[in-house]
Amino acid sequence: MQKLGWIILSLGLCGGLAPVTRADTFQLTDGASVSGDIVLFNEAGITLRTPTDSYTNVVWPKFSQDSLKQLAQNPKIKPLVEAFIETPPARPRNTEIQIQDVSRLALPPKESLFAALLSSSVGFVTLLLIYAANVYAGYEIAIVRARPIGLVMGVAAVLPILGPIIFLCLPIPQEAASAEGQAPLEQPTFVVPGGAPAAGGPATGGIHVAGAAAAAPGHPEAQIFQRGQFMFNRRFFETKFAGFFSVVRRPAEKDLVLVIKAARTQVVAQRITRIATNEAYFEVIQGGGRQEVMVPFADIQEIQLKHKDA
């Protein structure tokens, strides 16, 4: 009996020292919770024994994040649940923006437009081109307005831009106003045979027409066009000498020639080959052959239309 008592006492002491097993509680994603002891776990989930001695299986995706982290504290379960634990995004670090000084180009000093153009080679060349165009404009205006070329170009050189504008606004001189039309015909002077000659008339008797150049017998009288009475330009030649542009001349004009008296030369033209804005090109016979000679309108002083044998 004494031995039996010692055995019962030993069993009681052992039962008092044995640890009490506590069930764990886990939260699920649907808001519910489950409690129990872990009996089995694998890649699919975990098996729990509930306090009512029943078993339940819970797959890993059903556990909440907090429960998964709680299960990950077990080194054996951690490799299975790490894939289901969401890693929070890394917070961006507060990077301090440092603004550094940059090198800036120095602005040129403020100055007038004319001085700015002279300060660079490109601007200087531009001014020279504008000045040359201004002088050339004076040359063109002098031709169009029938003014002395040297005078207009000199004023344009001394007074750029404004000088050509002044001459462009001036009217064409009266003596050149008839350049677009026919020259006025002089009234013929008739002399009665045997009578006294008129003042300034010819001394010989007979009937003749004054104001025309003397012509050889049997040839038509020459027509003279002088600068000052006519403006020599492209329109003048196209209207006065239209027959001289064709290669085959009409019978009435085939023996006529143009004698162009220029400042430095004299040209006897058989035909007008071509005409431009500022000059005309004439076909002349030199050395037994035909050549083309260019004569500027500004150099022409007089033009005679006469018979080639006159």
Image: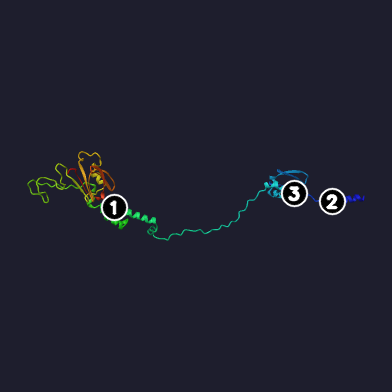
Residue under the point 35% across and 55% down:
128
Name the residue carrying label 1.
Answer: 139
Mark sitting earlier along the chain (1/2): 2
Q: Position of residue 219 (x, y in %)?
A: 16, 42
Name the residue carrying label 2.
Answer: 14
Instruction: Residue 170: name its quadrant.
Output: bottom left
Residue under the point 89% across and 51% down:
6
Q: Nearer the viewer, mark 3 or mark 2?
A: 2
Asked if residue 159 lies left or right of residue 46, the reply is left
Determine which of the numbered discs, if any, sits on residue 298 in the image.
none
Mark sitting earlier along the chain (1/3): 3
Query: Few, some or many C-alpha atoms within 10 Å of disc 1 (few <14, some 14-19, many ≥20)?
Result: many
Asked if residue 93 lies left or right of residue 159, the reply is right
Q: Nearer the viewer, mark 1 or mark 3?
A: 1
Mark sitting earlier along the chain (3/2): 2
Which residue is at the front of the view, 159 or 129? 129
- Describe the element under mark 1 as helix, strand or loop: helix
Query: Few, some or many C-alpha atoms within 10 Å of disc 2 (few <14, some 14-19, many ≥20)?
Result: few
Q: Nearer the viewer, mark 1 or mark 2?
A: 1
Name the residue carrying label 3.
Answer: 24
Toward the front, the furthest residue is: 287
3D distance between C-alphas at marks 1 and 2:
134 Å
Residue under the point 87% across and 51% down:
10
- Describe the element under mark 3 as helix, strand or loop: strand
Q: Position of residue 85 (x, y in %)?
A: 67, 48
- Describe the element under mark 2 as helix, strand or loop: helix
